Image (cartoon, grey):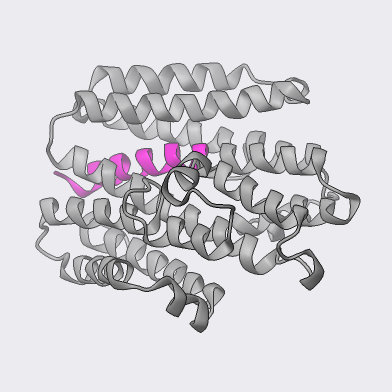
């Protein structure tokens, strides 16, 4: 497969996953702002900007941190490359460029999603309508991923799609967990209280893992068990370990001529996740561990670009 074709398929899938992740973040943020306290309002509003590393771009527009401004910027702003609008547009453009490499169902799903997205107006995303929009984005992402898995031939296009999807998902899970534990760590008197419990519950819901937590641990919500679930639990589809299991499998199937450095780093990350102990991670510092994971994923993304996609 030509590197420019692989690049389009890889980023098509990353952008759809990113749009879904953004919808999840905004959905939980909207709920926490509406039902949170005055003291937590600013923290809740700043969290999505911290997770997406887009605070500098947002505040360069001289806008205050408000829920409406946040939704405008992270959902609908065509100038923000990580907004839901931009992700869906770019995913559709990438799919259009490689239509002969993907199935007609994949193309039709992305094209229909983009047509519907263009009809969304700022005035529509207020109150319950905003929640409906975020749910719609998640449903379209689920549909695209299901159609892809159910229709595309198990070849290079499939592998690059999986690679993009799960690398993006792992990065998002690490950032969400890091922001809750480090950036938005409650005061000492709040730890273990109703506010702390509510925030951890919201985090679990943001990655569709609240029911999974209850099923696996059958216990009240403890930070160390949340971290165990989202980092090391391979049965949890959005955990770092589960994502990197998929990433390494996709790279093993690709077997490029110049991908040794990329495959080695992916394997090292997966081995660390497979053999890690959550208590040792907490003793060494969860924030430090997640920061290292995010840096390694960024480095892996660069190596993948260089090895397979023709860019550094």
Q: Is residue 208 magenta?
A: no
Compared with residue 27, is residue 171 higher up or lower down, i.e. above or below?
below
Residue at coordinates 12% horizontally, 58% vertically from top-left? 256
- Compare residues 256 and 52 and report the one nearer the observer: 52
Q: Is residue 2 magenta?
A: yes
- Answer with left or right where residue 63 lies relative to residue 53: right
Residue at coordinates 46% horizontally, 75% vertically from top-left? 279
Give the farthest residue toward the right.
38
Compared with residue 311, is residue 115 higher up or lower down, i.e. above or below?
above
Quadrant placement of the N terminus? top left
Give the farthest residue toward the bottom.
284
User: Is residue 82 in view from this perspective?
Assistant: no
How far across and how far down the image is residue 191, in percent? Answer: 73, 66
Compared with residue 281, is residue 54 higher up or lower down, i.e. above or below?
above
How far across and how far down the image is residue 179, in percent? Answer: 62, 62
Compared with residue 180, is residue 8 higher up or lower down, i.e. above or below?
above
How far across and how far down the image is residue 161, in percent? Answer: 28, 41
- Answer with left or right where residue 117 lies relative to residue 188: left
- Compare residues 48 and 58 and report the one nearer the observer: 48
Label the magenta part by its dominant secondary structure: helix
How far across and how far down the image is residue 107, in percent? Answer: 32, 22
Residue at coordinates 20% horizontally, 44% vertically from top-left? 159
User: Is residue 89 in view from this perspective?
Assistant: yes
Q: Which residues are magenta?
A: 1-20
Snapshot quadrant of residue 128: top right
Quadrant placement of the C terminus? bottom left
């Amino acid at each position: 497969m030509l590197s420019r074709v692989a690049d389009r398929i890889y980023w098509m899938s990353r952008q759809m996953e990113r749009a879904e992740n953004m919808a999840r973040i905004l959905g939980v943020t909207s709920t926490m702002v509406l039902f949170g306290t005055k003291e937590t309002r600013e923290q809740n509003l700043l969290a999505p900007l911290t997770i997406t590393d887009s605070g500098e771009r947002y505040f360069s527009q001289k806008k205050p941190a408000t829920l409406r401004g946040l939704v405008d910027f992270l959902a609908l702003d065509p100038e923000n490359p990580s907004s839901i609008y931009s992700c869906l547009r770019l995913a559709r453009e990438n799919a259009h460029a490689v239509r002969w490499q993907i199935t007609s169902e994949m193309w039709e799903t992305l094209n229909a999603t983009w047509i519907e997205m263009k009809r969304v107006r700022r005035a529509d995303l207020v109150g319950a309508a905003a929640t409906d929009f975020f749910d719609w984005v998640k449903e379209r992402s689920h549909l695209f991923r299901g159609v892809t898995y159910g229709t595309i031939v198990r070849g290079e296009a499939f592998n690059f799609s999986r690679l993009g999807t799960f690398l993006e998902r792992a990065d998002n899970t690490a950032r969400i967990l890091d922001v809750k534990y480090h950036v938005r760590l409650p005061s000492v008197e709040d730890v273990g209280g109703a506010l702390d419990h509510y925030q951890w519950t919201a985090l679990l819901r943001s990655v569709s893992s609240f029911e999974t937590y209850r099923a696996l641990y059958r216990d009240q919500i403890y930070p160390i068990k949340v971290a165990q679930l989202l980092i090391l639990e391979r049965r949890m589809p959005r955990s770092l370990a589960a994502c990197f299991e998929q990433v390494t499998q996709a790279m093993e199937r690709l077997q490029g001529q110049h991908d040794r450095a990329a495959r080695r780093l992916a394997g090292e990350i997966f081995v660390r996740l497979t053999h890690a102990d959550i208590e040792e991670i907490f003793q060494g510092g969860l924030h430090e561990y997640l920061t290292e994971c995010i840096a390694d994923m960024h480095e892996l993304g660069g190596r993948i670009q260089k090895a397979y996609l023709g860019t550094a």
